[in-house]
Image (spheres, helix red, strand yellow):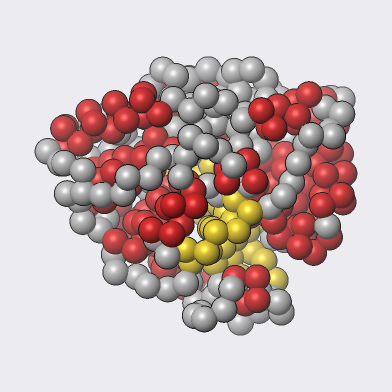
């Protein structure tokens, strides 16, 4: 698919949402991630997100994944948008610890190690190749793919991949105050452990030495698909795009994210899109007028993105408008606070 903007290419197609699930020990570095009420609970965040999308409730934990301050998972937004779009959901295990109580396609990966240690993803090539095979299989004449992720600690490993490939762009965070120096220190330790300097890695070596299992799987699906693909997410999807470009792939790429990511002054989503030759699109979803403090907190920089929230809300806005989407998000959130 070349020469057309992403939204033009999907006019007569139906979406298929693919959520890549994984774990990384990097999420347990103190202060790195808000994708869980505590570092230990981050292990359950991907499984809980998957259960929430399919069942409307989490079964591996009580309630839904929240930040330490009680802000709910962006899966609330994704669930609302998916309901409006009436899109099918495919869950794919790129390297999970706790498994969700839900049907999951297994890509044969294992949970990622700590980015500060050598080779946290030794099977990065296998995950990429199996992702490419899945992308080819899911491609249909009337389909486009919306590829998303749920992996706590994923912005830190994304920073690792970007740095190993020689990109200077910084990643976003699920925390209001992006702990960039913590991430940079973890990346420096990881580069030293792998005997690399910034820019030394080539191709999938960057994921093997500095990444997580989700990133090569996402890159593989995008590279293998013979249909339009929207990478639904923020700077993690920018890292997946960089990884795909590092393999020599020049296909058109589109990244769909939230307004909160684009407006985040601590990260470089627009620069990263430009460096990887990707079209960057964002939803205009706002919670400024929401009656729920947990949702209004997104306007203060909490969470910002995840579980494909930006790409899915963009697509829902395009088809149904901003107000119906906000109403649906509040309805989903209301079902949580009332239980």
Q: Toward the viewer: 284 or 139?
A: 284
Q: Is residue 53 above or below residue 296?
A: below
Q: How many marks?
A: 0
Residue at image position (27%, 55%) is 204
Q: Is residue 198 above or below residue 68?
A: below
Q: Is residue 93 left or right of residue 193?
A: right
Q: Is residue 187 visible?
A: yes
Task: Give percent across and percent down for residue 122.
Answer: 25, 46
**Quadrant of the rendered image containing residue 160:** top left
Task: Give percent across and percent down for residue 2.
Answer: 49, 80
Residue at image position (69%, 32%) is 299
Q: Is residue 264 left or right of residue 213?
A: right
Q: Is residue 101 above or below residue 232?
A: above
Task: Give percent across and percent down for residue 139.
Answer: 54, 74
Residue at the limit of the structure toward the left, as seen here? 195
Q: Toward the viewer: 266 or 203?
A: 266
Residue at image position (29%, 26%) is 185
Task: Give percent across and percent down for residue 8.
Answer: 65, 76
| Image quadrant where one finds the C terminus | top right
**Quadrant of the rendered image containing residue 89:** bottom right
Q: Is residue 79 visible?
A: no
Q: Toward the viewer: 169 or 290?
A: 169
Q: Is residue 42 left or right of residue 289?
A: left
Residue at image position (26%, 51%) is 165
Q: Is residue 189 left or right of residue 251?
A: left
Q: Is residue 240 above or below residue 182?
A: below
Q: Toward the viewer: 298 or 135?
A: 298
């Amino acid at each position: 698919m070349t020469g057309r903007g992403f939204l033009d290419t999907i006019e007569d197609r139906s979406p298929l949402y693919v959520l890549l699930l994984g774990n990384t020990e990097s999420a347990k570095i103190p202060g790195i991630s808000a994708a869980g009420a505590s570092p230990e609970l981050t292990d359950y965040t991907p499984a809980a997100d998957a259960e929430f999308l399919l069942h409307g409730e989490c079964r591996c934990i009580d309630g839904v994944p929240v930040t330490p301050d009680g802000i709910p998972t962006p899966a609330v937004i994704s669930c609302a948008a998916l309901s409006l779009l009436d899109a099918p959901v495919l869950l794919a295990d790129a390297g999970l610890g706790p498994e969700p109580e839900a049907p999951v396609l297994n890509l044969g990966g294992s949970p990622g190690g700590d980015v500060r240690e050598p080779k946290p993803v030794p099977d990065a090539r296998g995950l990429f190749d199996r992702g490419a095979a899945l992308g080819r299989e899911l491609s249909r004449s009337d389909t486009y793919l919306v590829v998303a992720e749920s992996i706590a600690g994923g912005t830190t490993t994304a920073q690792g991949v970007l740095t190993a490939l020689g990109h200077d762009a910084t990643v976003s965070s699920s925390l209001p105050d992006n702990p960039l120096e913590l991430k940079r220190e973890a990346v420096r330790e990881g580069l030293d452990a792998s005997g690399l300097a910034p820019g030394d890695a080539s191709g999938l070596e960057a994921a093997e030495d500095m990444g997580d299992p989700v990133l090569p799987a996402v890159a593989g699906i995008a590279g293998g698909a013979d249909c339009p693909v929207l990478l639904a997410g923020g700077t993690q999807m920018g890292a997946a795009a960089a990884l795909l470009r590092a393999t020599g792939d020049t296909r058109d790429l589109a990244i769909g994210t939230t307004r909160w990511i684009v407006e985040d002054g601590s990260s470089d989503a627009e620069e990263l899109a430009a460096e990887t030759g990707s079209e960057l699109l964002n939803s205009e979803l706002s919670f400024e007028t929401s009656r729920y403090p947990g949702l209004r907190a997104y306007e203060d920089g909490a969470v910002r993105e995840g579980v494909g929230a930006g790409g899915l809300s963009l697509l829902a806005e395009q088809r149904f408008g901003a107000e119906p989407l906000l109403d649906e998000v509040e309805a989903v959130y209301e079902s949580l606070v009332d239980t």
